[in-house]
Image: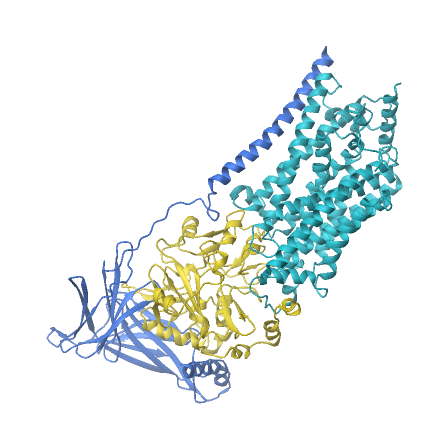
Amino acid sequence: MKNKNASRRKFLKLGLAAGASALIGGGSVLSAISKVNKPAGGDKVKMLSPEGKLMEVDRGHALCCGVPTSKEVRKGIPGRHFVMVIDLSKCRNARKCVSACSKMHFLQPGQEYIKVFLMQDSEDTSPYWFPKPCFHCDAPACVNVCPVGATFKREDGVVLIDNERCIGCKFCMAACPYSSRVFNWKKPGLKPEANYSPESSVPQKIGTVGKCDFCPDSFVSGILPDCVTACPNGVYYFGDKNEDVVTNGVEALRFSELVKNKSAYRYMEELGTRPSVYYLPPVDRSFPYERGFEELPEEMKKAYKVKRAHLKKFKI
Amino acid sequence: MILKKIFQIILVLTVFSGFNRIARADEPVTPRITATYAKLSDGTKRISIALSARQNDKRVNIPDAALQIIAQNEAIKTILGNVITNQQGKASLDIEPGTTLPRDQDGYTFMVLFGGNTKLDKTSQSIHATEAFLEISLNEKDTIKTITARVIKHNEKGEKVGIPDVPVEFNVKRLFCLYPIGNEKTDSLGSCSLEFPSTMPGDKNGKVTIVVRMPDNETYGTVEESKDINWGTLLVYKVKPIRGLGDTDAPLWMVYTLLVLLTGVWLHVVYIIVLVIRINIIGKKAIKS
Amino acid sequence: MSQQEIAQQKLVEIFAHFGKPSKFSKGLFIFLILIVLFAFYALILQMTRGQIVTGMRDYVIWGIYEVNFIFFIGISYAGAMISGILHLLHVEWRKPIIRIAEMITVISVLIGPLYVLLSMGRMDRFLHIFEYGRIQSPIVWDVIAITTYLTCSILFLYLALIRDYALLRDNQELKISSFRKKIYRKLAVTYHELPLQKKLLNRGLSVMSAIIIPLAVLVHSVLAWIFGMTIRPGWHSTIFAPYFVIAAVFSGTAVLIIAMWIFRKYYHLEEYITEKHFKYIGLILLVLAGLYGYFTFSEYLTVWYGSETWELEVIYKLFDFSDYGAWFYLAAFAGVLIPMLFTGIPFFRNINTITIGAVIAVVCMWIKRYLIIVPTLETPLLPNQDYRPEYVHYHASWVEWSLTAGGVALFFLFFMIFIRFMPIIPVADISEVPENKEFISEKL
């Protein structure tokens, strides 16, 4: 939390005030801990108008100009193409992105829109941590197979799901080669008082598919996805490819230069899905990969250590 | 860098452990208010506040605390309103342009008050911001585009004077951040200039927003100014309706194939139904005769 | 009375016998109803609590529901292919068994799609497919193909029944309720064996049997494409459509043999369904088993030889005895070789062994479909590093098993209901003079 704070402070320096919020209502200094379920992005901002009226403005996950129509939601923001760059050399499986995402999307316990894998390309190479959100592919296999058009690709590159249309056939989950999608097997526990929109995907709906949505409801207000700001190590860079700048909340870099200079790649390019997520190779690491195990519960540690057993057994 | 991260991690831990310690402490602690003032490019004045307290040699952010913000001069005190700190112990107040605030000769004084409770003492902090302005002029000569910024303030006579030797940041506004294109220091006249990079993308008209800031100055706070100009490279952006696998409309060959197959089969179904009806009619006729 | 009329009368008597259910069939009926009711309870549980009550999780998103779906659509091939092809070729001995085959088709096409509904998270939104349907999606192809297929197989069954209904309507000695008489009268339209009527009916039957074959091929190809269109090892294969088609005809034929055996035993139809029928259908099963084995071999050889990591992972899950090995060898070897042994070698070949072979084939085909669906889903491209064991390995829950049992019970129930309204032997056809004298050799 403090880390987020620190990056946010820098962020303010960059000229955008995020995070600094003011919530109406009293409460003791210490009551805060029980209030962790506030929507992280739903920050309110106090605004004093010329008439001397003190207003509260939602600066987070809401649009400046009212709720977009479903047509607008399916179209996206014209002239944008959102991309993410993930710097594998800085990831140490801190899992702050995972928890921030789960909190922000009110995910059910155990559900993860972002998964952090422990990858090892071959026996001779070193393992590395591989955070994986939805790749928002430009040729999305999931969108192709959807029978009802519940999942769709927008002009701005974002792939979303309309949970009010989804029939729960899970074909998209079968089609996605990256296992990016999760299913709401049971009734979502938390029921935030929010109007559903495919852009916020909150509240979740039972029997439908969910996934990382790049948090497009905050794009208009210029607020970064929560995983980006939550990461203590600045692993995630996010931005508009057409603007050619990506930022991790601390530094802003030219996208074209970054991917060129650091030999960025897209995972499994040969599958032809054309992801919008680029990876910077895990060279000159900030952390040894073992650090990633430090704060993990025992069962997760174990799960990470399961290798491709069958291939081993048959000596491949 | 790593050290800084470790430091941050330690801070995280203290945030959690710290609360409990405050809770147990009998002696009230005096919290610290840090307030900063910024004038944004749209004229909004923003007061950002951070509230923290020292506990067991560690600084702890205080969330959910009510703070009162007052604008004042020698004569008047105007209560601007109350804000509540967030999880990070931060709060902010935006004052929209056009709001009349009590001011003194060269700027504004704001007072931030914390009322205190059983565990925390009441405290206050005042900041004074001398009003400063940023002027941007944009020139283009022989394809060289130059941004010139001048930082000025009004002297006692109301004349504009440049503020020398202050750092100025030049940025291009992007959706999620400001992209820094350079840092300069003002000269004796309060101006500095920078060449605009030639490869910066703009929108479809080439429009970019240039944001110049004087950051975190002790006397003036943060001052920000912006200007739009069509210096960026043009965004070529065309959306043509495609009938692809992922689109709403199916590829035409698919539609035709399906139509041919379906009509092929269903015509036969209709034919069979007609046959049955004919058999029925023939039978009825036979019965009649 | 001519010889033909005597034969007809006898058949009608047998059929009329169905009117009074025996104690055994009453008991069976109640037993099946109970199973269906229990499945219904499981269904309500799944609908109220969500699919959390199944064994399906984020990686293995389809379980035995999908297996049952393929299985039932597969056995529907009995009617479509066997009776369609045999009808087109005017194979005379088909007559006593085509009704059974066509009934299997209609019933299994009625039941199969229920499992698609079950594997959907939101059955209540099923109509969205018609409201928002995108024809790029293989699921939409499937919905279109199966509805068409169902319509055509019902028509096919009905067309063949018209003559029987006319016969039953006109039979005065038949002691059945007036309600059923009324139904017969309606269903028989006004068919009176007039030459023109007969000509039209035969034309219709020929058209239907010609249409149903490509349609059946298409339905199972589309079904295979649901899997084949995804980039997944074990699924993304060009031979998947023909492989599924062959597998479907294979299992459909096997189910037909089992049904023939049951009806023969229970209704004492030894006179009509003879050992010859078993041997002929057994030969078809033999050919299909060979074809199916050939496809299986070709599929796994190609993939294994290619040695792509992702593909190999699935393959070795199937080969490894600590994983799916035993099931795989059972399904891929025993399920093919034993039926081949019983149908191919004259020494082993008799009604009972052929039926046993068919049972083995059917069971193994179900297992094989499980092995197509589950191990692939258990092998994602990125490693499955989930710490929750139920997310790593799929185990069907009792809800899924009871709904599976419910489907099978429903299959038998439908059969019991169907045979009360339609003769399981085409009475009119069988007493007819053969269309041609050409016969397959007696010495098989």
Where residue B91 appears, x then y in whole percent?
37, 73
Where residue A56 appears, x then y in whole percent?
37, 64
* Residue C344 lies in quadrant: top right
Seen from the viewer's position, the closer of residues B128 and C105 is C105
* Residue C53 lies in quadrant: bottom right
Seen from the viewer's position, the closer of residues B265 and C20 is B265
Extreme residue toward the top, this view? B289
Q: Say above or below: C325 vs B163.
A: above
Q: Say above or below: C52 vs C136.
A: below
**Relative to B261, is A25 on the left or the right?**
left
User: Which residue is depicted at the point 75% across and 50% down?
Assistant: C336
Q: How many marks?
A: 0
Where residue C368 appears, x then y in whole percent?
70, 53
Seen from the viewer's position, the closer of residues C313 and A137 is C313
Q: Quadrant of the C terminus of chain C?
A: top right
**Relative to B40, is C397 on the left or the right?**
right
**Relative to C420, is B195 on the left or the right?**
left
Way the structure is coloured: by chain
* Residue C430 lies in quadrant: top right
Q: Is residue A32 visible?
A: yes
The picture's colour for chain C is: cyan
Where residue A200 appears, x then y in whole percent?
46, 58
Query: Which chain shows up in yellow?
Result: A
Q: Is residue A205 visible?
A: no
Q: Say above or below: A221 vs A149.
A: below
**Relative to A254, is B75 on the left or the right?**
left
Q: Quadrant of the N terminus of chain C?
A: top right
The picture's colour for chain B is: blue
User: Which residue is depicted at the point 75% across and 42% down?
Assistant: C253
